[in-house]
Amino acid sequence: MEDFTISGSLMYMFVSTGILIIAIVVLRVLIARYIRRNVGTTDLRRRWLVQSRNGLLLILLLGLFFIWGEQLRTIALSIVAIAIAFVVATKELILCVTGSILKTGAGSFNLGDRIQIKICLLPRSLKSALVSSLTNGQDV
C-alpha cells in the first residue's frame, strides 16, 4: 500500500484556504454583532447584514481565486485541450462518414471494375512484369 503524500505547496494552499475561511467567518460574526447592536431600524439592519454578507463572500471568492489561481489555470488548460481533441476527432469522423456516403451514393465504381495504374518512374521491364502480375498473364 502506497503512502499518500501532499507536496509543500499544496499543503500551503490548504492551510491558506483554511485560515482565509476562518478569518472570513470570524469577521462576519463580529460585523453581524456590531450591526445588530448599533443599527436601530429593522429594515436598515437587514440591509446592512445582507450587504456585509455579500461583501465578505466576494472577498472570500477573490481570496480563494488568488490562492488557487495557478491550479485553476492548469485545470482550465487541460479542459480546453480535451475539448479541442473532441472537436478534431468529431470533425474527422464527420468527414469520413460524409465521404463514405458520397462515394457510395455517387456510384463512381463498383466491385469488379477495372482500374488503370499509371507508373512513370519504373523501368520498362519492371512495368511489364508488374502489369502481367496484376492481370495474371491476360492481355489488356
Image: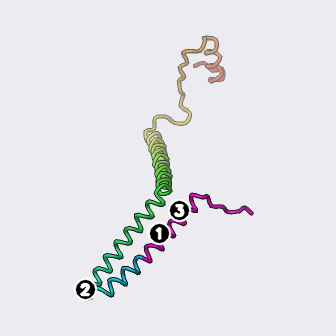
Label 1: which residue?
Answer: 20
Amino acid at the residue labelled 3: Met
Q: Secondary structure at mark 3?
A: helix
Q: Position of residue 65 (x, y in %)?
A: 43, 61
Tell me residue 74's x, y (percent). Answer: 50, 53
- For the point 50% across and 67% down, the residue is 17
Identify the magenta region: 1-26
Q: Quadrant of the N terminus?
A: bottom right
Q: CA gap, disc 3 to disc 2?
A: 39 Å
Badge 2 amino acid: Asp
> Which residue in the rendered view is the most extreme toward the right?
1
> Does residue 27 sit above or below 116 in this rendering?
below
Asked if the residues shown at circle 2 and circle 1 are in contact, with their CB atoms under 8 angstroms apart, the answer is: no
Residue extending furthest toward the top: 124
Question: Is residue 10 magenta-colored?
Answer: yes
Q: Residues within 10 Å of mark 3 (few under 14, many from 20)?
A: some
In space, the residues marked 3 and 1 are separated at their CA atoms by: 10 Å
Could you tell which of marks 3 and 2 lies nearer the N-terminus? 3
Which mark, by number, is residue 43? 2
Task: Name above or below for residue 114 compared with residue 38.
Answer: above
Q: Looking at this view, is 18 or 109 the one in front? A: 18
Element type where label 2 sits in the image: helix
Cβ–Cβ below 8 Å for labels 3 and 1?
no
The spot of residue 75 in percent (x, y) is 50, 55
Image-based side of 24 in relation to 41, left or right: right
Q: If you read the primary sequence from the N terminus, does the residue marked by circle 3 or circle 1 appear first?
A: 3
As drawn, 23 above or below 128: below
Residue name at image x 25 percent, y 86 percent:
43
